[in-house]
Amino acid sequence: MPRSPIAWAFAARKLDIARLLYSRGADIDSPNAKGWTPLFYLFGSIGNPELAPATSSDLPFVHESPVVEYLQFLCSASLQDIDAQDSRGWASLHRAAIHGQGSDILEFIREHASLSLRTKLLQWSPIFMAVHSSNMSTFNVLADHQPGYINEKDIQSWTLLHVAVKRGCKKILERLLRDGADVHALTDVRATIVPERLRGRQVTPLDVAKVADGDALAIFLEVLCEWNKDVNVIWEGDDCDVFYPSTCF
């Protein structure tokens, strides 16, 4: 996918080159055919931008500056649209929620970026991306700045708790339950972008945990029992039921 000169400088983490290019008239807002502006290239790796949060080993050059400095440079250079969305409805904040740090999210917030922009396919806001990638740093900041975040649902009526259970991140699960996530929330029976065993069903977070990979079920049950000591787990062979005290309803 063709990139502008500044996009290349951002992807390679060369702020000095980006500044030079801008001083010579390079456009900081120009999108490529996919709809990505240079801002999108601050998050993720060059070779495969959909990887999990990138480390310096994912990039061909050593980072010269924190991402926050790039954001500050863009805004001082009169960035026109910090909320620009690509062809899939992703904004740069969606990518930051996956690949970034809490400090990056704070900078977006200081620059009045929208926290509620949604993707086209599943209607995910950035906080869904943070949960899906188990990025506790970005999740905490996004949650702190969205009082009603716990009620977020996507187009299939999956809540953040459904997504978190599938990923098995204990710290995110703990905060969601502490903040009032609904353990009884049901998904839309018409949902199709779900594991095969969940299709045609309305499912709770526990149902998601039961079909998730790895230790997702064990982690969710552990968090549930720590969250409320009166939660009772009854096993029958490889299956289990969870009985919640009336205070959980």
Image (spheres, rainbow, N blue to C red):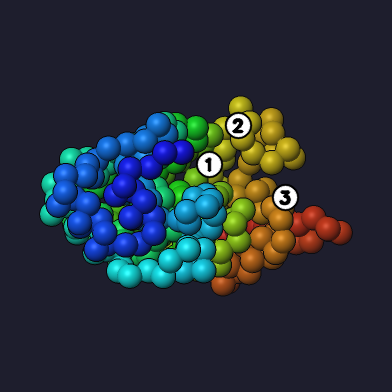
Left or right of residue 17: residue 88:
right
User: Residue 130: x percent and y percent?
Assistant: 45, 55
Name the residue carrying label 2.
Answer: 191
Q: Which mark is residue 117?
A: none
Secondary structure state at the residue bearing disc 3: helix
What amino acid does circle 1 point to? Answer: Trp
Mark 1 secondary-structure assignment: loop
Front one among 100 and 63: 63
> In this picture, is 29 found above or below 108?
above
Q: Which amino acid does label 3 sit on?
A: Val
Residue at mark 1? 158
Q: Of all residues shown, which one is farthest toward the top? A: 190
**Can you say whether 155 is above or below 22 in the image?**
above
Vertical order, 120 against 183 (above or below) = above
Q: How crowded is mark 1: few (under 14 residues within 10 Å), some or many (20 or more)?
A: many
User: In which quadrant of the rendered view does residue 118 lie?
Assistant: top left
Q: Mark 3 points at which residue?
A: 211
Q: Is mark 2 on a helix, strand or loop?
A: loop
What distance separates the C-alpha of mark 2 from that of mark 3? 16 Å
Give the CA distance from mark 1 to mark 3: 15 Å
| Of 50 and 30, the residue lying toward us | 30
